[in-house]
Amino acid sequence: MLASEEKSLNRENAKIKHIFKKHITVEEMKEYSFPGVYVDEDVINKNGVALVPKGTDLESLAKFAPGMEETLRKWGIISINISIQEQIEVKTLENIIKSSAVDFMKVDPKFARDTVEQVSDVYGRIANGVCEPEDISNLVDQGNTLAKAVVQAPEIMFCLGHVRESDEYTYVHSLNVALIGGFVANKLFPGNEDLVRCLSTGGVLHDLGKARVPSEILNKPGPLTDPEFEIMKKHTIYGEELAKGFGVHDPRILSVIRGHHERYSGNGYPDVLSADKISIEAKISAVADVFDALTAKRVYKEPMECRNAIIMMIEKMSQHFDPVILRALVTSIGLYPPGATVELSDGSLGVVVGTSGKDLVRPNIMISFDKNGRKAEGVQIIDLSKIDEKTDEPIFIKKVVQDLGKIAF
């Protein structure tokens, strides 16, 4: 089997492991004695002896040590921590999300991977001095195709792929910025397909200049020195020069390439523009660029959860972005993106499968385990936004158990 075919097969059969952590009483252990439930921390008595080691599955414990509950009580242990592990096929989750109240756009995985590989190839060609205008023209065509996919759906599911290799970051990032930028443009200016095209194409090309930045600076596992940062900042200028040199002359696409690091407050680069002096294309791409950078894995950092990235952009970085554009991104993603696993206030556990975009904190939830710890039968989806807030016990998200961020394609 060819490596490419094996990759495709693996993506087709890909599964997501959801891990729900819960604190239960000893009396509740019987209710959780089913496959996929494990002790999450060593259960130790007052003499320091491990009565139940971490990783023990409760089903086996109930079968082979039926008197364990009584033993724990004798030692004064009244509760334990457990983890409930459930595997869901990516295909199944995507189908559920697709069938929820909101229609989500899904980019074809093969097309996404082809785009990433094509961006990688062009960067390599530029670095080696063998890039041709037709190579850039092919990337422009990819951007146009992405734009058409964006305008066909009112929302987007952020299944854009975590970077598996550190040196692949720039290429996957280019795809993500193209999708997010085109999506936000379509959200703000519905029907303006030309703007969506410019953002999608500009996103694919926006980091073109990094092909001229030394790899030791680009992938440095730590903070850049001031001289190194000055070199890094030039990638916006290099990118514009390269794009022009290879036949890209649309000023709006060039604006994305040169201006995606400009900041609304005037603290960006390379031209230190502010507010309305920054083009709408550059302002949209700036939001897309930062959101994806925060949620991506790099050699020097772990990926930030989508929800935490949104909160950071709202609370600590809002001065950098046009407030209208940032609001469009936030209301579309919500604080609980599709794929995040959550614990609800009634004790049940589930997976976020959609949001109306109007209520950031009350999305649609697919219940995995009910409040008594029993595995849900079939597909049960509840819309938290439709639950009457005036009832005695409104249901709300208590905490995020696991934020998957972006599902790998």
Image (spheres, helix red, strand yellow):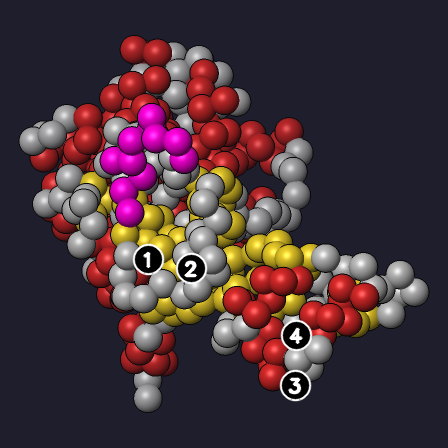
Number of the front mark, 2 or 4 = 2
Q: Quadrant of the N terminus?
A: bottom left
Residue 396 pos. (x, y %): 41, 37
Indicate yes or no whether the magenta region holds residue 384: yes
Which amino acid does the dot numbered 2 rest on? Phe
Which class describes the residues within 10 Å of circle 2: few (<14), some (14-19), or many (20+)? some
**Residue name at image x 46 percent, y 41 percent:** 345
| Disc 2/disc 3 C-alpha distance (Å) | 25 Å
Q: Nearer the viewer, residue 219 or 185?
A: 185
Would you name the residue on which mark 2 appears? 369
Would you name the residue on which mark 3 appears? 64
| Disc 1/disc 4 C-alpha distance (Å) | 42 Å
Q: Is residue 308 visible?
A: yes
Residue 386 pos. (x, y %): 25, 35
Residue 212 pos. (x, y %): 45, 45
Q: Is residue 94 visible?
A: no
Number of the front mark, 3 or 4 = 3
Would you name the residue on which mark 1 appears? 116
Q: How many marks?
A: 4
When the figure is inspected, residue 113 is found, relative to residue 142, above or below; the finding is: below
Residue at the limit of the structure toward the left, as seen here:
191
| Disc 2/disc 4 C-alpha distance (Å) | 20 Å
Tell me where the magenta segment starts and ends, as one range: 382-393
What label does residue 56 carry, if any? 4
Which class describes the residues within 10 Å of circle 4: few (<14), some (14-19), or many (20+)? some
Which amino acid does the dot numbered 1 rest on? Val
| Disc 2/disc 1 C-alpha distance (Å) | 37 Å
Indicate yes or no whether the magenta region holds residue 389: yes
Which class describes the residues within 10 Å of circle 1: few (<14), some (14-19), or many (20+)? many
